[in-house]
Amino acid sequence: MVATPIAMGYVWKVIFDSSIGLVNVLLRFFGQKAVNWFSASNVFKMLMIVEVWAGTPLIMLIVLAGITGLSADIYEAAKIDGANSIQITYKITLPLLSPTIVMAFLLRGIEVLKIYDVIYAITAGGPNQSTENLNLLVYTYAFDYMQMGKASALMIIFFSVVMAFALVSMLGKKQIETKYLQ
């Protein structure tokens, strides 16, 4: 979580390298064929693995903070009423944690939408622009083609997408709160 994203991207690029990468070495060790992770069909899967690895600690910290904020009295009352651990999990813990989970989803979703450096370090948007996202496209327009107007317009579109995502997430959070926390 504290690693510099660009450095992390270069490390993962080596880990997924077709010939010397750790992933393919392990695949060969277990009798599987090596995978070309940088092909158009596999590169998106590779980037998803990297992003899940990078984002899991933040999500776990947020959820752990939410769990530690729950009162023990609720669980004692549920046990006295005869609830088992599955009922406690699905009827008490998850509904009480749902606002925290939605907030973690919102933060992580915005983080994924604005990713630039990891993708640039690993694939630079390739192969054939299959991993090029809006941020890489803005960079290309702004600094490769020097078309600042198009880059600015794309960033306004990006801002609108992030705001729409945040609005939908917050509406979902509100619905969850009204459903479970009344």
Image (cartoon, rainbow, N blue to C red):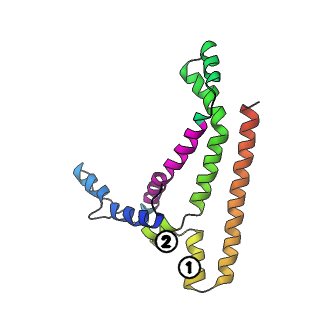
In the rendered view, tell whether residue 147 sits above or below residue 50: below
- Tags 2 and 1 in contact by the CB under 8 Å rule? yes
- State how far apart marks 2 and 1 are (Cα): 10 Å
Q: Secondary structure at mark 1?
A: helix
Which residue position holds label 1?
A: 140
Residue 88 horizontal/vertical position (percent): 59, 23
Q: Which residues are magenta?
A: 44-66
Q: Measuring 58% from the left and 70% from the top, which residue is drawn there?
A: 135
Q: Main secondary structure of the magenta part?
A: helix
Q: Amino acid at mark 1?
A: Thr
Q: Position of residue 56 (x, y in %)?
A: 49, 48
Res 163 quadrant in image: bottom right
Label 2 vs 1, first from the N-terminus: 2
| Residue 105 x/y as whole percent | 61, 48
Viewer can see residue 131 = no
Q: Is residue 59 visible?
A: yes
Quick check: 144 above or below 53?
below
**Crowding near the residue tagged with mark 2, few <14, some 14–19, many ≥20 C-alpha atoms within 10 Å:** some
The answer to which quarter of the image holds residue 165 is: bottom right
User: Residue at the location (58% across, 86% down)?
Assistant: 145
Q: For this view, does 83 lie left or right of residue 177?
A: left
SS for dot 2: loop
Q: Horizontal placement of 29 versus 18: left or right?
A: left
Along the line of sight, which residue is nearer the eye, 78 or 39? 78
Please give the label number shown on residue 125: 2
Question: Quarter of the image containing the C terminus?
Answer: top right
Amino acid type, mark 2? Gly
Q: Is residue 170 magenta?
A: no
The percent coordinates of residue 54 (x first, y second) are: 47, 54
